[in-house]
Amino acid sequence: MGLELICSAKVITNQINEFDANYHEHFFCVRTIAKEYLNGAADATLSEQSTIRLAEQLSFVLKEWGAGRFRKAPPTREEPEIKEFLCNSNLRNDLYKIVSTDLRFLCLQANARTIADEAQVTEVEQFDEILLSVLNKLSKRLFNDNTNVTYPMKALLLITGFMPAFDSNVKRGLYRAGFRGFGGESPRTQFRLPEEHSRDADMKKLTRLPFVLGDCWANYHNVLKDGIMESEYRNLIEEPGRVFDVLFFMQGKQNNNVELLRFQGPERWYEII
């Protein structure tokens, strides 16, 4: 079982360059500020300036990405509320753990999830708990009346770069790659955010997919690296989660017949341990 890269480095370069330039700019703008914000978690100091800037840019970009504008997209809370939320040290510590347990530390061995010893979190059960907890907090404290997973995942992607966000194009890209459970050519409009202690199928899709992606990143790193480094966005080499977000988005884009990634495995792929 695994995710295969089925295109050349040149195709990767072209797809990255064809992805909307504004979205590239938005991502790197927030990530740059988020790195300053998250680095404070390592020594338990809180930077007022980076927190204010992150609240401002995160709010702006989430709105640019459709929050409160697209159908069923939840509106963001006001900036002072977002700033107060980001000041929470427990939240920032958990976000730092996610950043420090990025896809490069995740893999599959005999269809079981493993995390490298260098990661901040090395137990898969703890990883599951932290990821779901953070997504639920982002849902409740960044947005009004949100129940869907999409925009909390967009916020997580912007702050940490950890994994793709399940918008309609990404879900279609996942389906076209061979992942079941996201709908077909017309993706599920509602992918509800699982509760923190859920063990249902949607929870497993959220927590298992990063390991499949991490395994793919390791297996095809040279081709991915060549494609990224020839693109206009070479900084993506440090953002494997965002790379997969872009590739699945492009693979799922309407009228784009390019094949980039193909999953080989059982229909209930998310039942891995």
Image (cartoon, rainbow, N blue to C red):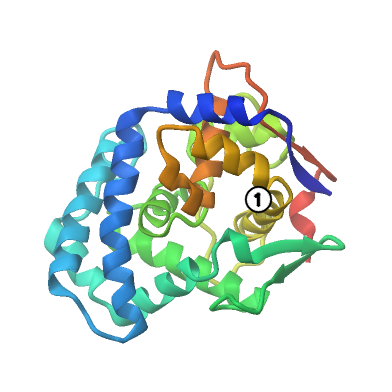
In this rendering, would 71 be left or right of 128? left
In this rendering, would 231 be left or right of 46? right
Q: Residue 146, relative to residue 108: is it above or below?
A: above
Q: Residue 197, percent across and down?
A: 57, 72
- Residue 138 visible in rendering: yes
> Crowding near pointer 1: few (<14 within 10 Å), some, many (20+)?
many
Q: Secondary structure at mark 1?
A: helix
Q: Residue 273, relative to residue 94: is it above or below?
A: above
The image quarter in which residue 93 lies:
bottom left
Residue furthest out toward the bottom = 44
In this rendering, would 43 be left or right of 230? left
Q: Residue 171, relative to residue 106: is it above or below?
A: above
Along the line of sight, the residue nearer the viewer: 249 or 25: 25
- Residue 190 visible in rendering: no
Q: Residue 240, percent across and down?
A: 54, 51
In this rendering, would 117 be left or right of 39? right
- At 57% from the left edge and 27% from the top edge, which residue is drawn? 252
Along the line of sight, the residue nearer the viewer: 103 or 135: 103
- At 36% from the left edge and 58% from the top edge, which residue is drawn? 159
Report the number of discs: 1
Quarter of the image with the C terminus is: bottom right
Q: Residue 71, percent across and down?
A: 35, 32
- At 19% from the left edge and 67% from the top edge, which residue is drawn? 51
Residue at the spot of label 1: 217
Amino acid type assigned to the residue bearing label 1 in the image: Trp
